[in-house]
Amino acid sequence: MATPSQASYAARLARAEQFYQFISNFQNYDPGIPELTPSGFQLLVSQLSTIQTEHTTTHHEFSEAVRMRKNTFNANPDSISKKLTLVNSYIKAKSGVNSQQFIDVNKFVRKIRGEKPLPVTSNSTQESISRSEKSYGSQLQNFTDIITLLQQFGTNYDPTNVAIKIPALNTLLTHATTVNNAVTQKFSAYQPKINERQTGFKTLSETTSRIKEMVKSQYGTKSTEYNLIKGLDFRK
């Protein structure tokens, strides 16, 4: 389902197509300015259509990367968060809640659970994205520190549950690092498309306003030509 923002841009693009059809059929319409001609306006609409498609594609890829990261860190049954619950339980049971092993591991577990990354969406600012990346980066480092501690425990850490043995935790760490990096990469591809679309649709609004004024000056305020296009709004 399209977001309100996506629907708004798509609606404006559809109106731009309609606007083009109108001005291309105005008899003797001659603005004398290339970008205000029907062919110049058609080129702008074509460029915006391409930008909208690229924005939709990169937004989907970015959103999918964000979803996979969330699953890996918190949501999935085998996520970092849920596995650490089992790790904590094993050490508490084997060594005791007052043992140094449990105290040291639990310190890092609590740090991970204390991290509250900001939700990353298509409307997120660069600052909020940066804060979210730092939060996930901190979780990865704390998870790495936990694995290092477990390795130092030697035979004192030897759970029967294969899912929380050190090789499985290392595999999860590698996967978590990969999906976290993927979010950064996808956002790097997506953010320029946000800026391109905003700039492109601002140009659309400005250009249609100029064309309306040109049509009004050529055909008159009460002309059929002007009345056909004056109500087509290209603002947000």
Image (tube, grey):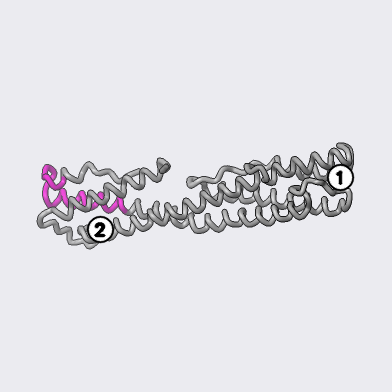
Q: Position of residue 144 (x, y in %)?
A: 75, 53
User: Which quarter of the image is occupied by the C terminus?
Assistant: top left
Q: Is residue 110 visible?
A: no
Highlighted range, magenta: 204-226
Residue beneath label 1, please? 101
Left/right placement of residue 183 relative to residue 77 reads left
- Label 1 crowd bin: few (<14), some (14–19), many (20+), radius 10 Å: many
Secondary structure under tag 1 reads helix
Quadrant containing the N terminus is: top left
Q: Amino acid at mark 1?
A: Gln
Viewer-nearest residue: 11 or 236: 11
In the rendered image, residue 192 lying in the magenta stretch gets the answer no
Q: Three-letter amino acid code at disc 2?
A: Gln
Q: Position of residue 106 (x, y in %)?
A: 80, 42
Q: Which dot, 2 or 1, sits closer to the camera?
A: 1
Report which residue position mark 2 lands on. 42
Which of 32 and 49 lies nearest the eye of the viewer? 49
